[in-house]
Image (cartoon, coloured by chain):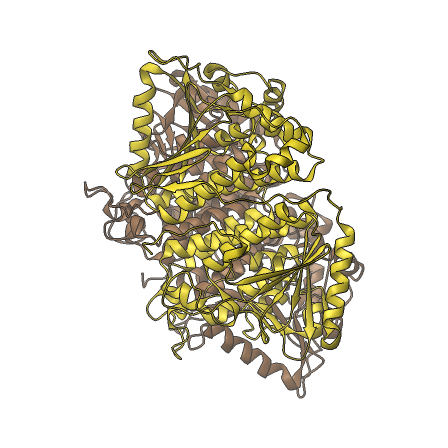
Chain colours: A yellow, B brown
Amino acid sequence: MTERIDFQTDPSRYRHWRLAYEGDVATLFMNVDERGGLFDGYELKLNSYDLGVDIELADIVQRMRFEHPEVRAVVLRSGKDNVFCAGANIRMLAGAAHDHKVNFCKFTNETRNTLEAAGRESGQYYICAVKGACAGGGYELALACDYIILTDDGSSAVALPEVPLLAVLPGTGGLTRVTDKRKVRRDLADVFCTVEEGVKGKRAADWNLVDEVVPNSKFDEIVAERARAFAARATRKNGRGVALTPLARNFSFNGSVTYSSLEVTIDHKLGIATIAISGPTEPPPADVAALHAEGAHTWMLRCARELDDAILHLRLNELEAGVIKFRSHGDPALVLAHERLLLENDGDWFAREILLHWKRVLKRIDLTSRSLVALVEPGSCFAGTLAEILFAADRSYMADGQFEGDNRPAATAILSEANFGSYPMSNDLTRLQTRFLGAPERVESAKARSGAPLLAHEAHEMGLVTFAFDEVDWDDEIRLFLEERASFSPDAMTGMEANLRFAGRETMETRIFGRLSAWQNWIFQRPNATGEKGALKRYGTGMRGEYDVRRV
Amino acid sequence: MTERIDFQTDPSRYRHWRLAYEGDVATLFMNVDERGGLFDGYELKLNSYDLGVDIELADIVQRMRFEHPEVRAVVLRSGKDNVFCAGANIRMLAGAAHDHKVNFCKFTNETRNTLEAAGRESGQYYICAVKGACAGGGYELALACDYIILTDDGSSAVALPEVPLLAVLPGTGGLTRVTDKRKVRRDLADVFCTVEEGVKGKRAADWNLVDEVVPNSKFDEIVAERARAFAARATRKNGRGVALTPLARNFSFNGSVTYSSLEVTIDHKLGIATIAISGPTEPPPADVAALHAEGAHTWMLRCARELDDAILHLRLNELEAGVIKFRSHGDPALVLAHERLLLENDGDWFAREILLHWKRVLKRIDLTSRSLVALVEPGSCFAGTLAEILFAADRSYMADGQFEGDNRPAATAILSEANFGSYPMSNDLTRLQTRFLGAPERVESAKARSGAPLLAHEAHEMGLVTFAFDEVDWDDEIRLFLEERASFSPDAMTGMEANLRFAGRETMETRIFGRLSAWQNWIFQRPNATGEKGALKRYGTGMRGEYDVRRV
């Protein structure tokens, strides 16, 4: 695993998926290349997947929204004959390090959530057409779709065989979507999750594991019909798609990565990654037409895509960077001007998609298991959308006043409309609502100050930043914090942050990342699953797992 | 750990707590006996606790409700001079097996929840009077109280030092109550949970870590005042307390335990514990006065207490019994008659307390990490309160019709008012609401059938039981299920059941058991905490923990 995992791809490079477009319906064929695994040591048989397959899927779901606004329904089906999808590749899982397993699951979960939100948010509904075995992660992929059609051919079944077969959980949302989305009765869910061969035919529909079971002879016809019906539900979007052109990136030997709107640097000694965001240097496009003309180059989209890539890069490739430090520099008024164009035109599908992309990127930050700290320094531009990063961070430090010999303006933070509804977290609350769970009136008084540049003492008084320090203390305080953080157990940080970041309300999403994933992480550490005699390690050897039978 | 852990105690045997009563205010002094640890190898210094200390606390909170209905406020304070409570004993944690740690935390969490509910449910409010260090589990105990008063003596502080000191989480509800109950702002919570020495004085009140900081000179006076104020809020209860007399129990060499209203037997080969409940054999007391006269001997209270003890015994002492099989026998009409007396008189504090005890016992069952199965057989009495066990179980099997050569009546299940509101789960829904999350109309139609004896085919059709089998298939189906369950990884079962049992809505309680505990369990497996060089193992050696710095 020394090679860098790259989250950028494009249709010309897909090895595992094929797309066909016909009017407002797209068909997405999963046809995993057995020899296309991201690492050596396993073959992706039976449409099983690894992170590489999922990176392509994430790219597809993302491009569908930007490049194919005409699509209103996507049929997901297998490109292979006798199998829909066998789930995550077991040998890959058995061979992967704990951190890779956990991060792999997190990314696949994020991709499922994005796919699931596409109908509601962007009017692109996913219809899953299941023929052949649909097991484990395969069924979890189906669960993320808006509609599941299963053929009644006497053998095709849906299954979650993880528990009996591998002694792990269906952790890509499976258990949670079965109870919370499909609302399968809990005792039937217990039966379903312990039956290796799964459930087929009428029973699958009776238990609500699928929406419809159809005769094999009518399968294609009914799938097409349902796709048309979903397409008819969605709003037609005007205008042509916007190509997501390749990101401008430059990786350096010392770990730093330079993008057009941000730079990542790594302090390997202390284990700190810094993401420094550059605000826009030009005014925003004059109107929506000009926005479309700028396309993927417009600052708001460029910065979102680059930030997303940077976060994923750090998660998978820089495991020892336990802290991510966010900085920014630029003109806050320009950030707000670019943002305003989108907010004022959110009836335009492209403007809206850019905001929705920011929503996903910010959620990705919330879910990143690194200590997040934001430094609001002289000359910074944490305004509106970028100010949201202050509220995603575990702590924020704000510099009070100008610094000697530094002619940049004193640090300010500026709130905008975007901080009060554009970017809900996984818990469906805004970051400010979550922050002020005990004092909702503070959200209101913050709203009343929208647009005003807030100096450190004001932002601190309003509870928008954790600390304000003047130049005398600034460097020392930051250094102390970073050294302290580096001295803590990374695992304890992960557990603590996973609890403190998501106060109060829970949703299906937070339950997947909080409850289900935490249990799965626990199980991924248990000898019964991942020990030398555990079920996951022994899979395929012909030997069953040997279990310590004590219940915990 | 070969000695049996006993959850029964009484005031004459307390080693760690002392009580003083004055009118409607009780004072509870924590004064842990250093040499009173449940196991060898550690001393309970600085009012630190182990399971034995907590068993006494649970007994106190329980008896307070039954034996001291006159108490309306309880002041919790330290019986030692310079320390309030240092939390769970670290050497005990470091030396304990994973399963003991997890079960210890679960029990202490249940005790905190019971204490926390006492004000709301029974009008017994807990006021925590903090003088001296109040750290980790000590502060988590305070967090469970209704009101926290901290003295401003320049040194007394509240703290959650687990993360920096031990590389584990404040897992007895700490993180969750800080964000959800105290609604401490998340970045301040981050600071608080990483400052070893904690927070004292005005800042503790400003951050809402405590309700009030008072001058040391006025401490006792203000504590007494607040206790009186809370007492005045609570409703006065009439009548004298009911003594919780010792349970009649008989432990046999083969693992079976005989109580007056139930019997526990163990199949060591398959790892199955059976709890067979005997319904009442006598009619209920004629009225409330007679109920009070029966006291702890009345069937509803006796059965609840015995069932609670049996569950706890299995959890801590029979780790290899991965399945708990519930059976019952008796006259369902008598069960309902006993229950009815309580339901019709829930204005009487004692009747109400018995129902509240059942609520807690049933929650304890929900949270027991064993596969739970209920067998509804001929001659059984799963009616009303006992029927609730069918809905707590992961699966239920119901016998269809009479069995040959068996003259007991065909199995029935009977619903009562108690199934529709008396016993909410931790998620604040009834078990039937949770069961029919996707079909709320089914709850209504079940309600319409209250009181009717439901035969197997009806109960099955109504979705109240998982399977109905006639005598031809009965034995085989049960055997197959039990064998299958025994072949699965106990850890995978634990994770699966923890997810499937609590669909939909989350509350502070479910977040403590679901999110927080799952992360803690994960951390309890991580070398950074529990490895030979981990912080928990090294505590007290003068050496810091050595950490693998990779983030997961």
Quadrant that contains the N terminus of chain A: bottom left
As displayed, is residue A336 above or below residue A237?
above
Instruction: Tell which of B170 and B214 is nearer to you.
Output: B170
As displayed, is residue A412 above or below residue A118?
above
Task: Give the quadrant of residue A334.
Answer: top right
x, y (%) of residue A520? Answer: 46, 57
Which residue is found at the position 33% from the left and 29% from the top?
Answer: A481
Instruction: Tell which of B453 and A435 is nearer to you.
Output: A435
Instruction: Tell which of A222 and A106 is nearer to you.
Output: A222
As displayed, is residue B514 above or below residue A487?
below
x, y (%) of residue B158? Answer: 39, 30
Which residue is found at the position 76% from the left and 69% from the top?
Answer: A221
Would residue A114 be visible to someone looking at this image?
no
Looking at the rendered structure, the number of numbered marks drawn on it comes to: 0
List the single residue furthest toward the bottom. B405
Query: Horizontally, is A299 left or right of B194 in the view?
Result: right
Which residue is found at the position 69% from the left and 31% from the top?
Answer: A345
Would residue A282 be visible to someone looking at this image?
yes
